[in-house]
Amino acid sequence: MQPLATLKALAAAVALSAPLAQAVEPIAPIEPPTGVNSAKAAIGKQLFFDPRLSKSGFLSCNSCHNLSMGGSDNLPSSIGHGWQQGPINSPTVLNARYNVAQFWDGRAGDLQEQAAGPIANPKEMAMPHDLALEVIASIPGYLEAFAAAYGDEAVTLERVTETIAEFERTLVTPGAPFDRWLQGDEAALSDDEKAGYALFKDSGCTACHNGPAVGGGMFQKMGLVRPYETDNPAQGRYALTGKESDRMVFKVPTLRNVELTYPYFHDGGAETLDEAVRVMGRLQLGREFSDSEVAQLVAFLKSLTGELPQFALPVLPPSAPDTPRPNPYGP
């Protein structure tokens, strides 16, 4: 073979090596959102930030899924209507489109079904659906937006939740250092981050934490090797199925942007990534990670932080004289 031909063959082999390596990895890159209905997503963005969907006129979707804080609220459990303590840690909304189901116990099949729950939940936004729809339908700016997106002004629960879900589907975080490494940029990760990923795979973590979201695609028992001790009463999918085999079985959380979404686990029982890694090693793998191994695993996990959504805060349409008023100080 001529030298030039040899060089071309080598170049072709190198070009193919990166996507080939990516194809065999258990984790895939996050891709920018596609196929979004921009008119519906624009309404959903307004509704996501609109506190008028709550009885108090104070809480919005963003209260518990704060997009300035990794899509969560950094509390062990969220604060609901009347300063009630929520029953469980608020999972991040970022990359939630990749989840097999929504909520820790998977009781909502998709983002649209999930969007309806917190609005009417008396411990969350405490707003009956019929009253929430009455509020939205009384605001001229929303009626105009619904007419533009749907062809008429009808405000229904299906449309409200569909628009919120459409906005949430845009909340993905591509461009993480780890994704750039998957796509062939060897310099995107440090030696410790690469070592942490190798340990992550060799230890069996990818059996549950895989796919684009590095989790969210299955359910697993919390305390697989040793029981998880907690005061939190949540029992996972057992509450839905009544099956003993589903007790303490929860949706595996995404590890994307995990350095931002502390505290960890369904009860917020681990304050730091270091602590979470050690607990998961003992309870799920039956393994005690050394300090150096923990440092490498944490370094890898931090490489999963991507480019957070960037947009101007929505300007909410003003209420009308007949818009039902909130009840911020009542029960």
Image (cartoon, rainbow, N blue to C red):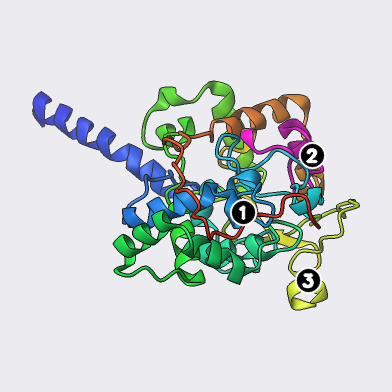
On the image, the x and y values in percent for residue 120 come to: 66, 65
Q: Which residues are magenta?
A: 260-279
Q: Earlier in the sequence, mark 3 or mark 2?
A: 3
Tag 1 and tag 3, C-beta contact below 8 Å? no
**Is 58 left or right of 75, judged from the image as shown?**
left
Q: Which residue is the site of mark 1? A: 207
**Of the residues under marks 1 and 3, which one precedes in the sequence?**
1
Q: Nearer the viewer, mark 2 or mark 1?
A: 2
Q: Main secondary structure of the magenta part?
A: loop
Q: Would you place residue 76 above or below residue 194 in this image?
A: below
Q: Quadrant of residue 289?
A: top right
Decide whether residue 265 is among the magenta residues: yes
Task: Estimate the x, y position of residue 248 in percent, counting from the top left.
Answer: 80, 62
| Mark seen at residue 197 | none
- At 58% from the left edge and 42% from the top edge, which residue is drawn? 71
Q: Label 2 belongs to which residue?
A: 270
Q: Is residue 134 left or right of residue 186?
A: right
Say whether residue 295 is visible. yes
Q: Residue at x 45, y 49 (%)?
A: 45
Between 52 and 269, the one lying in front of the other is 52
